[in-house]
Amino acid sequence: MGQLAEVKEEQYGSPVTVRKFGLRDKIGYMFGDFGNDFFFGLTSMYLMVYYTDVLHIGAAAVGVLFLVARLWDAVADVTWGRFIDSRKPGKYGQFKPWILRMSFPLVLSGILMFVKIPGMSDGFHLVWAFATYIMWGTLYSTVNIPYGAMASVITNDPVERTSLSTWRSLGGNLSYLVVGSLAPLILFVDNKADENRFLIGAIIFAILALSSYIACYKLSTERILANDKKEKLDFRKTARGLIKNKPLLVLLISALLLLVVSMLQGAVTTYLIKDYFGSAKSLSLVYTLQMVAALAVIPMITPLAKKIGKKEISGISMVICGAIYALMYFMPNMSLTTYIILSSIAYFAMCFLSTAIWAFVTDCIDYQEFLTGTREDGTIYSIYSFFRKVGQAIAGGIGGFAIAAVGYNASLGAQSPETLNGIFALNTLWLGIGFLVVGLIIMFLYPLNKKRTEQLTIDLAKRRSEGN
């Protein structure tokens, strides 16, 4: 699990002895996203169906809810990240104590999203949905921002950071595997969403999420002083660095688009399997195979990134992913089996970027330090998260509006052929175009290739040693 090592520099105000980076840190960091994605997966896959089929909220209204909530979350992310960076680190670090403190109200708010109060009007249910979803999203920021920023202070080694990114993705994928494979069996009865089953599922996932956050807190260790508290943070200096931080700017654009497409996929896939193919229970198989594909990527990422580079492998794989989805649109009368096989292959390709992207973020944090001389992990990560939330907001809005635009009506026993064809196009052609664009952005615009990333680490280490 790693040996103890003397740290010569001061950390958190006094010389301390900390463990060397090792397997314990990787497992602890894995548990963070394992906890995050129980509810994130539940909401991205099934919340729209819960709102339309259980609370009887119109799909367009759900789109407005997702858009408003995610835009609010984006502001909350940056506000919370700046707040975290302004706090003095404590005995156990600057970031991980907040994970423990805020995890309790977070999981409680997650349960409240799936509470349907009997005897209330549809208008009340709409207000309840707005209130509980926005509350959950705000509290999610208070846990996810310190969790994401913490990666850059666990280790400063690029290979070890890629490893952390890999383990984070492992946690998220395992969580999605649990939610994707088990949730359909819990939530649906006779191919219909069941309100009592949704509440039971939320309680189960809340217990699992809280246990995971506690494990993350117990097993992870912060080693790098996140910011010099003798100097007050200067937002103008940060802003000037951001404008010059081309890696971050390109990553923000590509991450926003990736989130738009991925969240759209999560929102409309349930309708594809439930209505187009007529088998809601098959969602379990779809999500299980996708998560197996994602898990297969994980042991490949670190050695490939070390040998070829994160940018190089991620760009190529995204282009492949987009091409597969786009070609599926031109395959008429596709069977469920064919769809599952091809979508699993495409998902496998997509996971190279989604697994490595957290390591891209830590590289951009380093580049910001190189530009400004100040380390602002929470602020930079929160800005990245801001763009993710904007992407989720756009996707949530597009998802609801798109389902409404193709004519989906939850009160109908069966959807019209035109609606079903529209749902199929959303899940193939439009996803393919989006993923293709992401791949091309990474390949041709993101500047930190393997060689430049390695040189950045050397330059920062030299600067830090000179500063001491």
Image (cartoon, rainbow, N blue to C red):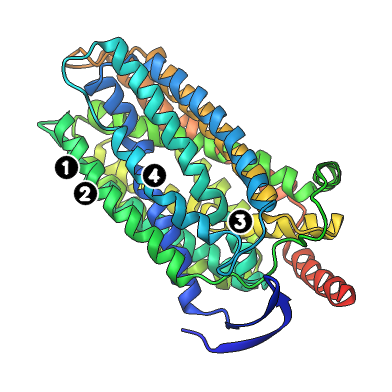
Labels 2 and 1 touching (C-beta < 8 A): yes
Report the residue marked by disc 3.
Answer: 149
Q: Give the SS element for disc 3.
A: helix
Residue 413 screen position, x and y as percent: 16, 16
Which residue is pictured at 64% across the width and 50% down the height? 381
* Occupied quadrant, residue 428: top left
- Neighbourhood count class around disc 3 (C-alpha, 10 Å): few under 14, some 14–19, many 20 upward: many
Q: Earlier in the sequence, mark 3 or mark 1?
A: 3
Which residue is pictured at 30% across the width and 14% down the height? 124
Is 199 or 273 nearer to us in this picture?
199
C-alpha distance separating marks 2 and 1: 6 Å
Q: Is residue 301 above or below residue 133?
A: below
Kind of residue at badge 3: Ala
Residue 182 bears which disc, if any? 2
C-alpha distance separating marks 2 and 3: 31 Å
Residue 300 screen position, x and y as percent: 50, 68
Left or right relative to 148: residue 202: left
Q: Earlier in the sequence, mark 3 or mark 4?
A: 4
Which residue is pictured at 46% across the width and 27% down the height? 396
Kind of residue at badge 4: Pro
C-alpha distance separating marks 3 and 4: 21 Å
Q: Give the SS element for disc 4.
A: helix
Kind of residue at badge 1: Ile
Labels 3 and 1 touching (C-beta < 8 A): no
Residue 304 screen position, x and y as percent: 58, 69
- Neighbourhood count class around disc 1 (C-alpha, 10 Å): few under 14, some 14–19, many 20 upward: some
